[in-house]
Amino acid sequence: MILPPHAATAASPWPQVPHGADLARARRLYDAPAAGWLDLSTGINPRPWPAAEAAARLGAAVWRDLPTPDAEVLAAFEAHYGAGAWPVPGSQAVIQALPRVWRRLHGSARCRVLAPGYGEHAARWALEGHAVTLCEGHELGEGEADVRVLASPNNPTGERFDLPQLQALAARCRLLVVDEAFLDAEAAAASLACLALPNTLVLRSLGKFYGLAGLRVGAVLAAPHWLDALRAEMGPWSVNGPGLQLAVAALRDTGWQQDARRWLAAASLQLAGLLEAHGLHPTGSALFCTVRTPRARALHEGLAQRGIWTRLFDLQQPRPYQAMRIGLPADEAGFERLEEALAALRKEIDPCE
Ligand SMILES: Cc1ncc(COP(=O)(O)O)c(C=O)c1O
């Protein structure tokens, strides 16, 4: 067994998984920038669906009533995501609940988890005492495994798995978990859920493409027995009433979705072009760029000294991996600030070194 990164240590029995949006850490480590922090440490859409305006239009009952998803809510989720979608309080809630559900149903699991990836997957399976092996994409289908876990597009690498690859992986395990938290941003990309395989579980999120990470709403798409088990584990009313109503409105807002996809496609191209122009070669998704380089720490620190907060990855397993992930600036002023900082840094750091 390979221990996952940031899992329980002697110092703490609880997983210590680093995340973006940790501006408190930036404030602890660096002087306050005169222009304020430019937070590019997440892959969250910086131009979110307008939830505040929609929230002002919600009726009083939604704040008062217990929020059991009704037929209208479920129809909106299923129309957007495909059959069998259930609203959850962020895909994170399923990532935490699933290893507990598995243990209750089947005992110990042998899990192969894609890495580098969203660190919570490996940490949560390990926390529940399952045997976790971290592996790169080409190793995911190898060996004996009960559960295989991946994200597509993957965070932070941007790696993608097409439907035949996913089908082949599903055929080699009892449960294939596919985290599609970043998929909504890509109109042409197909969800594994469209194959309706009985042993797959798909996670979706309104946090990334819709820019509503604070709302804590996502969806799980799976066969009915998996949905039943997860519903039981998460208990009644797991998504709050305003969250459900706002999610329904966002999922139905196809005009906003089209405009957002267009803007994200252009902004991510602009970001990739800017990085390339400074000798950095990014991979990524429509919502972030990731630059893998041995100079990632120097770049991350140099940008932080200039008030730009990015996400640093410095991992050892399954292979050494140093990278900096950069989210999209919301506007031209943000792009210009990043451009100036990279130009200044280039004089100090050779990214190709
Ligand atoms: C790949 C991936 N999956 C899932 C999550 C959890 O997102 P949420 O719980 O907001 O849906 C994240 C958060 O960063 C993520 O990067």
Image (cartoon, rainbow, N blue to C red):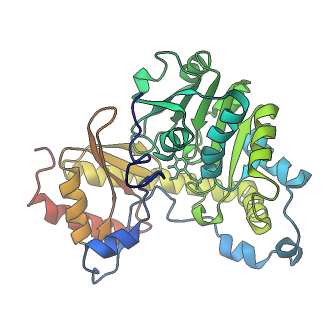
- Residue 144 vs 125, above or below: the answer is above
- Residue 29 vs 284, above or below: the answer is below
* Residue 32 locus on image (x, y percent): 29, 81
Residue at the limit of the structure toward the bottom, as seen here: 34
Q: Is residue 189 visible?
A: no
Count the numbered circles shown.
0
For the residue pair 65 and 212, the one nearer the viewer reads as: 65
Name the quarter where the N terminus is drawn: top left
- Residue 61 vs 197, above or below: the answer is below
Query: Residue placed at 41% from the left, 39% from the top?
Result: 4
* Residue 117 locus on image (x, y percent): 44, 41
Residue at the limit of the structure toward the front, as seen here: 10
Q: Is residue 316 visible?
A: yes
For the residue pair 312 and 292, the one nearer the viewer reads as: 312
4 with respect to 105 (left or right): left
30 with respect to 46 (left or right): left
Query: Residue placed at 65% from the left, 21% from the top?
Result: 174
For the residue pair 89 and 310, the one nearer the viewer reads as: 89
* Residue 91 locus on image (x, y percent): 62, 49
For the residue pair 187 and 92, the one nearer the viewer reads as: 92
Query: Residue placed at 57% from the left, 43% from the top?
Result: 183
312 with respect to 65 (left or right): left
Name the quarter where the C terminus is drawn: top left
Query: Residue placed at 49% from the left, 19% from the top?
Result: 141
* Residue 202 locus on image (x, y percent): 65, 37
111 with respect to 16 (left or right): right
Q: Could you say which quadrant of the image residue 348 lies in?
A: bottom left
